[in-house]
Each structure stands twice: as C-alpha cells, then as structure tokens.
Amino acid sequence: MITPAAFGRWRPLAWSWPGKVAALVLLAGSLALIVQVGRYFTFDSRFAFFVERPEITADRVWRACFYLHVAGGILCLATSPLLLWNGVAGGRLALHRAVGRVHAVAALGWVGPTGLYMTAFAKGGSAGQVGFLLLGVWFIVTNLAGIAAIRRREVPAHVVWMVRSYALILSALTFRVLHWLCHRLGSDAATNYVVATWVSLVLAIVAGELVGARLASIRREPAMLQASIP
Ligand code: HEM
C-alpha cells in the first residue's frame, strides 16, 4: 500500500536552497517555453519552422502529429513540476494519481509517438534524426518503466524513472537555449540544430541520472529519512 508518507521521505531535497533556485529557474523557463510554443495554436502556417520545409509540414498527417506533439509537450511541461513537487514534498496522493494519469496519456499517447513519427522528417540530416530517435525511445522507456515501477508499488524506482523522464522533457527547453546560443556565436543553422539536439540530449540524460541518484541516496539515509517522515 502506497501512503503519502512514502512520498514525503524526499522532503529534505525539496527544501534545500539549491533545490529551490533550480526549481524557480526551471519553472520560469518552462513557462516561457509554454508561451512560446503555445503560439503554434494560432494555426498560422507562416512560422519559419513550417515555411522552410513546405513539402513536409503541409502534409496532413505530419501536421496532426505536430499539433498533438506540441499539446502533449505543453501538458508534460505543466504537469511534471506539480507531480514532482507533490511527490517529493509529500502532497495529496489522490491529486498525484489524477495528474499522473494526464501526464501518462500526454507522454505515451501524444509526445512520444508523434515525436518518433516526426523524427523521420526532422531537420539536421541523419545526425539530427538519430538524436531525436534516441530521445524519443528513451522518453518512452523511462515513462513505461516509471509506470511499471509504481504498479509494483516500488516508489523509489518510480521516482527515479520519472525524474529521468522529466529531464528529457526539459531538453525541449535546453535545446532552444542552446540553439539560440549557437546562433549568437555565429554557427550556421544546420550545425546549430544538430549541436543543440545532441548537447540537450546528453545533458538531459546526465542530469536525469545525477538527480535520480541523489534522490535514491537520500532515500537510503536512515537519519534523514526519520527526520523527514511527517
Ligand atoms: C521528450 C520527447 C520529445 C521528442 C522525442 C521530440 C521530438 C521532436 C521532433 C522529432 C521534432 C521535429 C523536429 C524537426 O522536424 O526538425 C520536434 C519538434 C518540436 N517539438 Fe518536440 N520532442 C519531445 C519533447 C517536446 C516537448 C516536451 C515539447 C514542449 C512543448 C516539444 C515541442 C516541440 C516543438 C514546438 C517542435 C517544433 C519545432 C520548434 O518550434 O522548435 N517537444 N520534437
């Protein structure tokens, strides 16, 4: 039986200063990304991303996948911090379950499959496409593993897998920051895209492993656990 106390055992990390600052930066960045990509829902066809490859982006199947992808991405970006906060800081389990189901549908039903479909047509040639392929496959694996863990009632494994998945969602944010940075540094558009794809992917995998390991180690320290159990 999973109780809210099982989630509450990670409370020390949630209240640390580095944790608070990182959370604020990520929240602000996620909000900015949601506002930026939300503009696609004006359904205007004049966005540079569409105009530069009209033969692909005018296709109805691609377009349907694209809008589902962006809608799912926005849902994942919005629900992940709530789930993490609610889980780590020990909030209401019923809320966590309800929001978690929305997140699972958005991630596994929308973002992952549509991302994999669009990978076949992605910019950046085969180097860019292999990066998106790895991102999509690892994103689906982390979500499936996280859901399987919680079905087995293994809360620590669930947290670690979902942190890995959240790091991959945030790669959509680091991708855009890196893309802008490379552009400012004078790199050409094609190189920009591939560099931003791969660096954001590697950063997301490394960050997911580091934060996951940190949470797992806190979970194993009995003194901290006892101090933090409500
Ligand atoms: C984590 C799994 C994800 C995968 C595998 C993935 C994959 C892809 C792929 C393959 C493309 C097409 C790139 C191209 O045609 O060159 C794309 C574009 C896009 N994705 Fe994702 N994506 C993921 C997450 C997200 C998230 C979380 C968002 C947040 C809203 C997002 C928003 C977008 C947007 C807006 C585009 C259009 C390009 C742009 O405006 O920059 N994606 N994605």
Image (cartoon, rainbow, N blue to C red):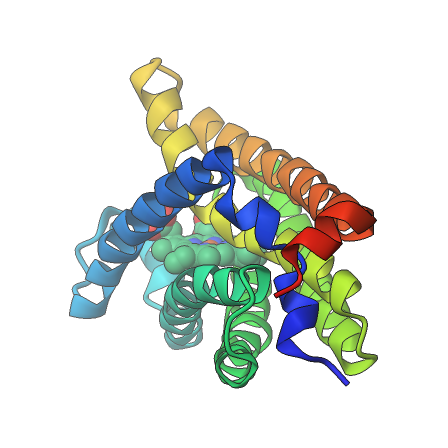
Residue 5: where, in percent of width, then height? 66, 71
In the rendered image, the vertical position of residue 191 relative to residue 174, given as above or below? above
Instruction: Left or right? Give the position of 122 relative to 145.
Output: left
Find residue 217 and report its horizontal and vertical position in percent.
78, 44
Query: Is residue 3 found left or right of 85 in the rendered image?
Result: right
Residue 153 in the image: state x and y as whole percent.
Answer: 80, 78
Who is closer to the viewer here, 118 or 152?
A: 152
Q: Quadrant of residue 112?
A: bottom right
Residue at the spot x=54%, y=36% of the render?
200
Q: Nearer the viewer, residue 160 or 46?
A: 160
Residue at figure coordinates x 56%, y 80% from the top left? 93
Q: Is residue 201 left or right of residue 66?
A: right
Residue 92 appears in the picture as rendered: yes
Ligand 1 resides in the quarter of the picture at bottom left
Residue 133 placement (x, y as % from top left)? 65, 52
Question: Quadrant of residue 208 in the image?
Answer: top right
Q: Could you tell me which quadrant the C terminus lies in?
A: bottom right
Q: Residue at x 45, y 38 (%)?
A: 22
The residue shown at (38%, 28%) is 189
Q: Is residue 102 above or below residue 224?
A: below
Using the image, determine if residue 21 lies above or below residue 116: above
Q: How many labels were placed on the picture?
A: 0
Q: Nearer the viewer, residue 48 or 26?
A: 26
Taking the image as drawn, is residue 120 in sight? Answer: no
Quarter of the image with the N terminus in it: bottom right
